[in-house]
């Protein structure tokens, strides 16, 4: 079997989904070849970008090879200003290449001027016009070689993000033309969201043979042979772990669970899609981590869980993995305990990502977030005292929030800016199929049949334009907050933030 991770996603670490699938297939004695087409495709586009036309672009083009090499080694990450310049320069080259194809292309984005990833007709058009895709020179050559070398009986594509969708379908179009008899399976986070939408009707008949929602291990094994139990396997990074990612060493992505153990926040797809919570036991997690760390000697461990389970956190403090780690955590009482935070730091925790969302208790209660804003302040103090950096996520424009509550959030962040290392600001999108949609006036039903969100009339009298204006003119304009925002690693954001997780964004690991 051939498993592909198509462009475009951040190329900082290997795609965990492929490592999990490969482990399950190889563990059942199936041949499996993985290919990170995202990383390879981006390196190809960077290496064949058009000549520069302005001074900045000329510098970016001239320094490209040196900047890529520096981003793949440790030294550059010791000097944040030089790091930021190198990332922006490399991205400048990507952007210029994208413009020649009518794209907004970056390390974190792929936006086509004419085709939308939320319209199935556009995805089908992308498949038919695969030769026009910016990655075509790369993927046509690479896939031809892989088909020759591997003669796969099944090809799987992992579609996690919107930015991958159009190129995923271009690759499918190419495969249909080149190898029409090999069945194609499409799975991943984005496909799961499509399939869990109650109004889903499959528009991809004839292009895609099998669409899979949720974990793909069982369905792939069923397609490859007689039914057999799907054994628990350690993610297998063979074919991925030694690739030249944009990182100062191998970042090991690892999921100790899928779904979310809280699953109550009203705006969250985990709640609206009712995804089951499937955790590994803490001893299994620790055994798997021991094996992975011994095999790969990673520089950093990235927990992919929606929220790392407190039982796993406790296991990590009892049996530290021996390398720095970070991930999302729910802000519960434990994190207000300084001794507990100190133990986490000693166990290698360098950064926690925290979905605080709002500084208003009323808004937090309205979204069923289950956190107490006073305890958030105490937890931020405890984490800072322990030397654990925080990547704080805020969400503006939820149905229960007006400008007054947004200003409470501003005041909270301004008061605690010294305790917050990084900030992510997002504007609320109303997920299609969420319970909240029923009680709100939907203003625009987007044309895209695969759209993930609705526009709605905000019950508290403001809308996206006013929220943006508030963020730009008030929130981001506060000098203390601006300092925190400027620390955020461009494009790679939280994926590279642990390398700047020292005090005030200085080098951390
Ligand atoms: S804790 Fe996070 S993942 Fe879980 S329901 Fe809330 S927002 Fe979603």
Image (cartoon, grey):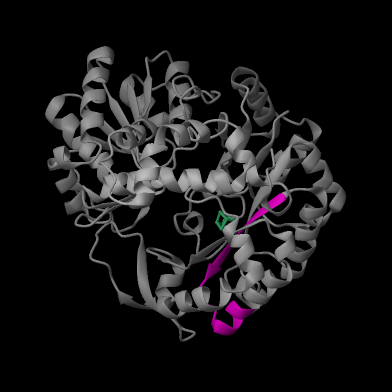
Residue 426: where, in percent of width, then height?
A: 50, 64
Q: Is 463 drawn above or below residue 124 in the view shown?
A: below
Q: Residue at x 63, y 30 (%)?
A: 299
Q: Is 20 drawn above or below residue 303 in the view shown?
A: above
Residue 292: where, in percent of width, then height?
A: 61, 23
Q: Is 398 drawn above or below residue 139 in the view shown?
A: below
The magenta stretch is: 389-407
Q: Residue at x 21, y 47 (%)?
A: 101
Quarter of the picture for ligand 1?
bottom right
Q: Is residue 174 left or right of residue 253?
A: left
* Res 191 visible: no
Residue 211: where, in percent of width, then height?
A: 30, 39
Taking depth in this image into account, of 27 and 316 the one nearest to the observer is 316
Q: Is residue 22 magenta?
A: no
Q: Is residue 400 magenta?
A: yes
Q: Residue at x 75, y 35 (%)?
A: 315
Residue 288: where, in percent of width, then height?
A: 63, 25
Q: Which image quadrant for residue 331?
A: bottom right
Q: Is residue 440 left or right of residue 208?
A: right
Taking depth in this image into account, of 192 and 198 the one nearest to the observer is 192
Q: Is residue 488 left or right of residue 411?
A: left
Taking depth in this image into account, of 305 and 377 the one nearest to the observer is 377
Residue sitting at the far right: 339
Residue sitting at the far front: 55
């Amino acid at each position: 079997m051939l498993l592909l991770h198509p462009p475009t996603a951040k190329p900082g670490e290997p795609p965990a989904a492929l490592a999990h699938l490969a482990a399950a297939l190889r563990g059942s004695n199936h041949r499996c070849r993985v290919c990170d087409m995202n990383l390879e495709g981006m390196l190809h586009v960077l290496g064949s970008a058009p000549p520069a036309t302005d001074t900045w672009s000329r510098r970016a083009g001239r320094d490209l090879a040196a900047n890529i090499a520096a981003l793949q080694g440790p030294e550059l990450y010791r000097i944040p200003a030089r790091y930021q310049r190198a990332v922006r320069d490399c991205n400048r080259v990507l952007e210029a290449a994208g413009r020649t194809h009518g794209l907004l292309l970056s390390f974190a984005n792929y936006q086509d001027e004419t085709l939308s990833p939320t319209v199935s007709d556009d995805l089908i058009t992308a498949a038919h016009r695969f030769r026009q895709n910016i990655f075509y020179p790369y993927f046509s050559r690479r896939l031809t070689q892989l088909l020759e070398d591997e003669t796969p009986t099944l090809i799987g594509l992992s579609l996690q993000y919107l930015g991958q969708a159009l190129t995923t379908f271009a690759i499918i179009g190419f495969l249909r033309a080149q190898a029409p008899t090999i069945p194609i399976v499409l799975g991943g986070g984005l496909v799961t969201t499509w399939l869990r939408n109650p109004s889903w009707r499959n528009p991809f008949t004839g292009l895609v043979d099998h669409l899979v929602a949720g974990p793909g291990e069982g369905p792939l094994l069923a397609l490859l042979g007689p039914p057999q139990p799907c054994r628990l396997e350690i993610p297998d990074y063979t074919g991925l772990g030694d690739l030249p990612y944009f990182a100062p060493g191998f970042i090991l992505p690892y999921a100790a669970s899928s779904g979310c153990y809280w699953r109550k926040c009203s705006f969250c797809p985990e709640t609206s899609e009712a995804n089951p919570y499937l955790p590994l036991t803490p001893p299994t997690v620790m055994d798997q981590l021991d094996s992975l760390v011994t095999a790969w000697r990673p520089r950093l461990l990235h927990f992919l869980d929606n929220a790392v389970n407190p039982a796993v956190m406790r296991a990590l403090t009892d049996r530290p993995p021996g390398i720095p780690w970070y991930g999302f955590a729910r802000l519960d009482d434990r994190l207000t305990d300084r001794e507990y935070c100190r133990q986490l730091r000693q166990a290698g925790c360098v950064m926690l990502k925290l979905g605080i969302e709002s500084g208003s208790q009323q808004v937090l209660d309205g979204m069923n977030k289950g956190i107490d804003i006073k305890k958030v302040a105490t937890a931020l103090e405890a984490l800072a005292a322990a030397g654990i950096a925080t990547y704080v996520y805020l969400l503006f424009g939820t149905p229960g929030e007006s400008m007054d509550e947004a200003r409470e959030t501003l005041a909270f962040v301004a008061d605690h800016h010294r305790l917050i290392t990084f900030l992510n600001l997002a504007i609320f999108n109303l997920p299609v199929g969420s319970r909240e949609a029923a009680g709100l006036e939907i203003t625009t039903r987007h044309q895209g049949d695969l759209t993930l969100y609705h526009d709605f009339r905000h019950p508290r009298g403001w809308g996206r334009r006013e929220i943006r204006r508030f963020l730009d003119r008030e929130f981001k304009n506060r000098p203390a907050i601006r300092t925190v925002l400027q620390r955020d690693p461009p494009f790679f954001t939280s994926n590279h933030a642990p390398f700047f997780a020292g005090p005030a964004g200085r080098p951390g690991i």
